[in-house]
Image (cartoon, coloured by chain):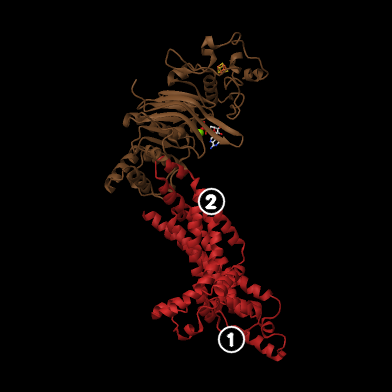
Chain colours: A red, B brown
Amino acid sequence: MAASGSSLKSYLLVRIAMVIPTILILLTLVFLLMRVAPGNPVTAALGGHAPPAVIKELTHQLGYDRPLYQQFGLYVWHILHGNFGTTITDKRQVTEIILQNGAATLELTVAAMIVALLVGVPIGLLAGRFRDRPVDAVTRLFGVVMYAMPVFVLGLLAQILFGSILNWLPISGQASPLTTALMTTHTNILLMDAVIDGNWPAFWDVFDHLILPATTLGLVFAGVFIRLVRVNVIRTLKDDYIEAARARGIRERAVVYRHAFRNALVPVITVIGLEVALLMGGAVLTETTFNWPGIGHALYIYLENRDYAAVQGIVIVFGLVVVASSLVVDFISALIDPRMRYK
Amino acid sequence: MTEPVVSVRDLRVYYGTPRGPARAVDRVALDIAPGETLGVVGESGSGKSTLGRGILGLLPEGTGIAGEVLYQGRNLVGMSKEELRHMRGPELGLIFQEPMTRLNPLLRIQEHFEETLRQHHPKLDRDEIRRRALEALGRTGIPPTRYKQYPHEFSGGMRQRIMIALALVLKPKLLIADEPTTALDVIVEAQIIRLLADLKKTSGTAVMLITHNLGIVAEACDRVAVMYGGKIVEEGDARKVFANPVHPYTRELLRSTISLETKSLHTIPGAPPSLITPPPGCLFHPRCPDAMRVCALKAPIEQRLEDGRRVQCWRHGPAEAIPDGGTEPLEREEIAVANEA
Ligand SMILES: Nc1ncnc2c1ncn2[C@@H]1O[C@H](COP(=O)(O)OP(=O)(O)O)[C@@H](O)[C@H]1O
Ligand code: SF4
Ligand SMILES: [Mg+2]
C-alpha cells in the first residue's frame, strides 16, 4: 500500500515537472508566430495613417526596435512576473482582460461543459448499451447533426427560435444593463458575485442570459461525447472481464454499471482534457454570436484590430489553460485508474 | 454409478454466420460424475469451448442451442436468462484461457470477491466475505497480504489462481476450465494443473478440463472425451484411451503429440471439416487413413465397447448397418497424401 502511494506521488511530481518544458515551448512558439505575422505590430495597430515619428516613438517604447533575443528575454521575464503586457489599441493590461473577460469565458465554458456532460454521457451510455436499437439510431443521428453543425449556425437558430419567435430568453450579452449597473464585483464571475451578495434577481437574470450560449456550445460538445462514450461502451462490453463477470453470475445491471460504464468512462476523462482546447475555440465563436463579453470575444476584436500585443497575451493564456487542464485530467485519471500510476 | 453432476444429452449449438449456420456442437452426449476430472481434447475449432460455454448458457446473442443440459433434474437449455444466471457461479463455474484480461483492471481483488459473494449470498457480512475469500485464495496459493491489490500487480499464473479462487469461493459442483494454461509457461502450467487435479480431493468439485494438450489430460484426468467437428468421437477412461485409442482420429492425435516430443513433425494431414457444409458420412473420412467406402456415405453410429468406451467409427460397427461392399477401402486421390507420413 505504501509502495503504491509513493509511486503515485512520484508519478505526479514527474508529470508536474514536465509542464515546465511544455510551457517554454508554448511561449517560444507564440513569440515566433507574432514575429512572423505580416507587418510591424505598431503600424498594424495604428493603421496606415500614423506619422512616421509617432510610429518610431511607439516602436521604441514597446521595445520592437531591440534585437530579437533581447525582446524574447524581456518577454519571458515579464511573463514570469505575471505581466502579460499591454494592448496597443486601448492600452488595457492583458492581465485585466484575462481577469474580466476570462471570468465570463470561464462561466460560459464551465456551463457548456456541464451541459455537454449531462447530455452526452448518459445518452452515449444508453446508445452503447442498446446498440443498434432505436435509442441508438436516434441518438447517433443527433450526434452526427450536432457534430456537423457549426456553432454559430446552431447559435443563430437558437436565437431566432427562443429569442425572436418565442421571446423566452435573452439572446445577447451576459446580463441586462440594469443588472450590470447594480452588481458589485468580487470574482468577475457574475453568477458567483450574485450569490455572494445574495442578489437573487441578478442571479436569475445572469442565469437566463447563460442558458442559450451555454446550451449551444454544450450541445456541440455533447455530440462529441455521445459518439465517444458510445464507442467506449461497445468496446468495453466486449472485454474479457465482462464475460468473466457474467460467468460468475453477476447481475446484468451490475455488469453494465459497475464494470462496463465505469471502465468505458476512463478514456473519456482524458478526452475531456483534450476537448478543453476545442472548447476554447468553440467559445470564441459562441461568444461572438451571443455578444458574450468573454476572452474569446476579446481575442476576436483584437485580431480584427491587429493588436498583436493583446493577441499574444490572450493566446498564451489559452495555451496555459490547455496545459493546466491536461495536467488536471492526468491527475484524475491517475486517481481512478490504478494502472496509470505505474506508467 | 453415482448420479452425474451434469448430463448433456443431444446438445447442438449453431452459430449464425453470413454463410449459414455453423454446427459447432453436434449431438453431444456426456455425463460428468461428482469429483471427476473429465478432459475434453481436440484440434482448435473442434467445438470444445462452445461445448463448455453451451453448458453454462454463456453463448453470444443469436446463437442457436438445442438439446438437454440436465443439472439436478432440470434442463438448463431453455431456462430463462435470470434462472441461468443464478446457476452460474454457485452451481457451475467457468475459467478461461487468457487470465491477463479476465479481472477488471479498475477493481481490487477484494472487490471482485465482494461482488461475487454478495451477488449469490446477499446476507453474508463483511467478515464472513473476507474469511471465505481469503480461504479460497489460500487454497490456490495467494497470500492474504495481496487481497487489496489490483490485477496488474499479479503475474499471469497468479491471475489464473485468482480466477480459480473466484470460482471456488462459490463452491460450484462443476468447474469448467477452458484451456486454463495455454497462455502460461510450462512450470506455471504444471502448478495450475496440479491445483485443478487436487480439487476433487479437497472439495469434491468435478472439473471439465478443456485442452488441446494431451499430456495434461494423461496427467490430470480420469476420463477423456475426444472432439472432432463438434462431435465426441471417442470417450472413455483416460488411461485406456491413451494406451489403446480405438478411433483413428484419437490415434492420429496421439501420434502428433508424441512426435512433437521427439521433435519430428507429424500433424494430421488435411484440415478440420467445415461446420457449415460438412462432408457427408463420417466427418473425418477425408483425412482418415482407415477410411472405408461406407465412411463417405453414412455417418457412423455410436457404439459402446466392452470396456465402457464410446466410439463413433465404422471400424467398430455395427456391422449390420454397413451396406454390402462398404468395408472396401475408400478410393480417392488424397489417400496418397494421408499415407505419406
Ligand atoms: N461467435 C462465433 N460465431 C461464429 N462461429 C464461431 C463463434 N465462436 C466459435 N465459432 C466457430 O465454432 C467452431 C468451434 O469453435 P470453438 O468452440 O471455439 O472451438 P475450440 O474451442 O475447440 O477451438 C469454430 O469453427 C469457430 O470458428
Ligand atoms: S468412420 Fe471411417 S472415416 Fe470415420 S474414423 Fe472410422 S474409419 Fe475413419
Ligand atoms: Mg477454445
Contact between marks 2 and 1 (CB within 8 A): the answer is no
Q: Measured from the top left, where is residue B154 in percent x and y?
A: 42, 45
**Amino acid tagged 1:** Lys
* Chain at numbered mark 1: A
Q: Secondary structure at mark 2?
A: helix
Left/right placement of residue A60 relative to residue A184 reads right
SS state under label 1 = loop
Q: Is residue A55 left or right of residue A104?
A: right
Q: Is residue A154 above or below residue A197?
A: above
Judge whether residue B294 can be spotted in this image: yes
The residue shown at (57%, 66%) is A278
Q: Nearer the viewer, residue A239 or A113?
A: A113
- Whether labels 2 and 1 share one chain: yes
Image height of B42 relative to A276, above or below? above
Q: Callout 2 environment at 10 Å: few (<14), some (14 to 19), or many (20+)?
A: few
Residue depicted at 41% across the width and 51% down the height: A258
- The percent coordinates of residue B297 (x first, y second) are 60, 17
Query: Would you place residue B91 above or below residue A227 in this image?
Result: above
- Seen in the image, is B145 located left or right of residue B15? left
Residue highlighted by disc 2: A134
Mark 2 or 1: in front is 2
Q: Residue B264: percent from the left, percent from the top?
A: 58, 24
Residue at which label 1 appears:
A91
Query: Is residue B220 visible to the viewer in this orientation of the structure?
Result: no
Which one is earlier in the sequence, the residue at label 2 or at label 1?
A: 1
Q: Position of residue B69 (x, y in %)?
A: 42, 29
Q: Three-letter amino acid code at disc 2?
A: Pro
Note whether ligand 1 is within 8 Å of mark 1. Answer: no
A258 w.r.t. A169: above or below:
above
Q: Chain of mark 2?
A: A
